[in-house]
Image (spheres, rainbow, N blue to C red):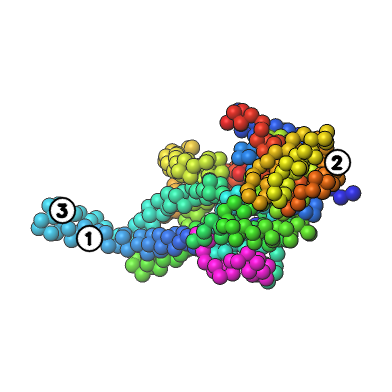
Amino acid sequence: MTGLVALLRKELCELLRTYRVAVVLAAFVLIGLGSPLTAKLLPQLLSTLATDPGGGFELLLTRDPTTSDALFQYQKNLAMVPVLVILLAMGSLSGERRRGTAQFVLTKPVSRTAYLLAKLLAPAALYGIGTSVAAAGCLLYTWILFGAVDLAGFALLNALFLLAIWFYLALTLLASTLLESAVAAGGVGLAGFALCSLLGSFDRIGRYTPGGLQTAIADLIRGTATGAPIAPVLATLLLIALCLLFAQRLLRRQEL
Amino acid sequence: MTAPAIAVRGLRRRFHDVEALAGVDLEVHGPGVFGFLGVNGAGKTTTLRILAGLLHATAGEAQLFGQPVSTDQLAVRRRLGYLPQDPVFFPWLTGEETLLLVADLFGLPHSEGRRRAGEWLDRLGLAAAARRRVAGYSGGMRQRLGIAQAMISQPELLLLDEPVSALDPVGRAEILALLDELGRSVTVFMSSHILADIERVCAEVAIIDRGRIVVRERIAALRERFLRPEFDLVIAGDAAPLSAAAAGCAWIEQLRVVEQSEHETALRVVVSDAALARRELPRLIAQSGVELLRFNAALPTLEQVFMRIVGASAPAERA
């Protein structure tokens, strides 16, 4: 894989210099710390409004918020991260082709496969770090506000989320390889996200799509998981591999 | 026998209904600076982009060092430096970091990359701007950086697409002097439509017109081939004695006064045989008793040659 290390260095430098690292980490910190806080404080805030004489409604709280509420809030907040991933990845290849910087790199002795892999691996690592940061924050605040969390289940939940993120990244990179316009590539990524979310809600089909990962995460939080979510994991891994393979084939023949 | 640095046979490229290259045949052996001339749209950039592995040919064959050009031919790219017509860089890198990135992409050790980056930044007058982001560079600075990035790997072949087009006259002279120096050890293949630049550094040229190579020759031979059998003379006083002497010479087709002042006369002599005229004309002037002030064979410029080859061929068709 000629040039992969050099290209990875370049991609990481670009992520840093263009403030993407800062934006992604800030978003993950906010999700990690904010989710348990929201679960804890939202009912109290609503109660304050309800007891206000001018509030105009009555709030009936049947129970106090629990660890599950914090984790569901965490899941809900994480569920919007693919939009950020798609927006940041949509110009990754099409933008470089349009600006001419792809020519600058690909007239050097580096393989196009390495070029594509660097475009995947650098942000994939960033999202890995971001997820770890969010998970650590969520774990800490949930432990402080609600009590202990099942560590193995929480780790699996985050791993499943990260896998879903990597799929949307690979899908958007494929669209960015195929299409001239970054906006069009972003549109394909978002359409894929919407479709997978929709399919995920159908139990029979959903389990064989990346959308099934969200269902598996919800089952883990509820404690209703009956076994390891092998089907959506394998389906997502397969789709990531197919996206990369197709993108690599396209890029190999592409004119710049 | 070593393979030519560039070998192109029957190269064709079509963009929709436009045939940019209509069967280009060309072989370039190095080292030396080889000029690739043509008007805008003649096919220069398309040829260079195919050689750099950025475009595919519709038909024909392109080879560098005996290896076919393709997007995956990394061994060939190790020996190649390429400067596009409008060099583009990552705006978030400094000039020095850009060169270090290129060195890294060529697999050079970091210390060696740093040494070469410093050397080329210095040679191209960019040392003071080395730590500034490329986004703030002028067009001329970007072109200099483009040449530096093409040279940092010490390539055997340099493909330069209009390398001095964005430079001011001083910068142009400096870069042409550098290319002249590089041409002693490297094969430099440079496209341009600025004929004076080509004439200054290239020993050999190919002229492309409407996707075909119409001439490929050494500049000296080209000038000789297109040498007009004309001589420019300046004599003291009146031209009448020389005109009288010329009347008896069958090889003089025309002798006309171009300019006349009180003390001297400029004449243009058109002859049928340039070699004969070079021998006989000085003798004729001496016999006529006129005082010769200046005597020049009318050597054509590359521009005149170019215009005769390309310019004369139906501008309406080109449009």
Q: Is residue A80 visible?
A: yes
Q: CA distance from mark 3 to mark 2?
A: 117 Å
Determine which of the numbered discs, if any, sits on residue B276 in the image. 2
Three-letter amino acid code at the position of disc 3: Glu
- Left or right of A135? Residue B152 is right
Look at discs 1 and 2 and give the one toward the viewer.
2
To which residue does mark 3 refer? Answer: A58
Determine which of the numbered discs, if any, sits on residue A45 in the image. 1
Can you tell which quarter of the image residue B275 is in? top right
Q: Are marks 3 and 2 in contact (CB under 8 Å)?
A: no
Q: Residue furthest right?
A: B1
Look at discs 3 and 1 and give the one toward the viewer.
1
Q: Residue furthest left?
A: A53
Q: Assess whether residue A153 is covered by the magenta stretch.
A: no
Three-letter amino acid code at the position of disc 2: Leu
Few, some or many C-alpha atoms within 10 Å of disc 2 (few <14, some 14-19, many ≥20)? few
Q: Residue at x 63, y 48 (%)?
A: B261
**Which span of residues is magenta-colored?**
B114-135
Q: Considering the image in quadrants, where does the N terminus of chain A appear?
A: bottom right
Q: Secondary structure at mark 3?
A: loop
From the top left corner, tell me how far across and down residue B295 is, in percent.
Answer: 75, 50
The main secondary structure of the magenta stretch is helix
Callout 3 and callout 1 share a chain: yes
Can you tell which quarter of the image residue B231 is in? top right
Could you tell which of marks 3 and 1 lies nearer the N-terminus?
A: 1
Three-letter amino acid code at the position of disc 1: Leu
- The answer to which of B193 and B309 lies nearer the viewer is B309
Few, some or many C-alpha atoms within 10 Å of disc 1 (few <14, some 14-19, many ≥20)? few
Q: Residue at x 50, y 54 (%)?
A: A162
